[in-house]
Amino acid sequence: MFLSNLLHFGQAIVDGATEECMTTTTATCSKTTTTTPLVHRKNNQNKEETIAAVSKKAATAISAKSITAEGIELPGYRVVDGINLIRNGHGLRSITYFGIGIRIYVVTMYSAKPILSAEQAMGQAAAQQQQQQQQNQDGIRTIVDASRTTTSSTNNTSKDNSKNNGPLQLDFTFLRYVSQSRVVSAWTQQLDHSVTYRDYEGYQADRDRFIRLASGGLIENKGMQSVQLVGDDTRIIDQGRLTGVIHGRNFQRSFLSMWFGSVAVSEDLKANLLKGDEHDPNDILQVKGELRQQQQQQVLVEA
């Protein structure tokens, strides 16, 4: 549908040029038909680049392979609001009880672009970029153009997350039956222990609402809970049913700090979620370059 709209837009440009030509003299019309106006060439180039980008993302999603971990099939990609999210990483959450390892769930993260660092995951790179742009406005010269960010466009849509990552989805597939009371206890302990970003008005209400939405009942063996971060919304999906939404990016950052903050649920799990799994290798290289550039810029700012 998106491609057909682009083609329709391109045809409208051609039709408009033909109609304008008919209202001019024959000489002018002849000249117009033999020379493509610069603005039309640019529009055609932009259209071709957009089509190529869309085609590349679609091809990446189609080529993303499913894998099996702990007996659970993990798809290569998910689709959220019409956007292809590629598997970025996965890992096992387990606990040791009296020397016995107990497997709890497999968590898988899907993202629109490769997410390779904790700072990038939590959107701190975007915050640093805003600081650099403000310094530029104040007349402080930076070595690298501060307009470069990890986002593919400066015009962010309502579906962008943290201004650079795009939508995210985390799936939690449980490897055992869990009673409702244990679900409540598990999410409560995990939030209270690992969330490091909670210094904002309304955090307690957001926390309580998340626990309520994620703990509405028992979880069957191989049952799955999902959390989607889309725009300003955090959607909680319990075993295929949307139980509710928490509004605001503050809670999104709180939720992400649970997995990528200084007191993450598991350091091994944190590292595994940031591997880039099925993303295009060229996209991974590009993001690595952008992250290095941002680190260099931050060093300059601090200096």
Image (cartoon, rainbow, N blue to C red):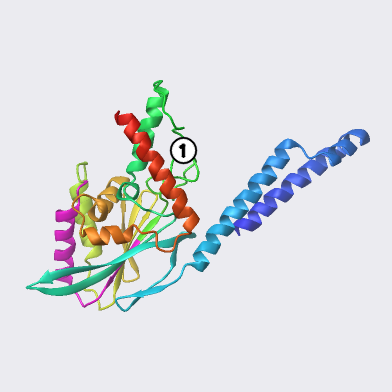
Residue 43 appears at what percent x and percent y? Answer: 68, 43
Q: Which residues are magenta?
A: 170-197
* Residue 163 visible to an observer of this rendering: no
As drawn, 182 above or below 37: below
Residue 6 appears at what percent x and percent y? Answer: 65, 52
Secondary element under disc 1, as helix, strand or loop, is: loop
Q: Nearer the viewer, residue 105 or 12?
A: 105
Residue 210 appears at what percent x and percent y? Answer: 24, 57
Q: Quadrant of residue 284?
A: bottom left
Report the residue marked by disc 1: 148
Q: Quadrant of residue 275?
A: bottom left
As drawn, 200 above or below 58: above
Give the number of marks.
1
Residue 285 appears at what percent x and percent y? Answer: 45, 52
Q: Residue at 34% across / 30% down in the picture? A: 300
Amino acid type, residue under disc 1 in the picture: Arg
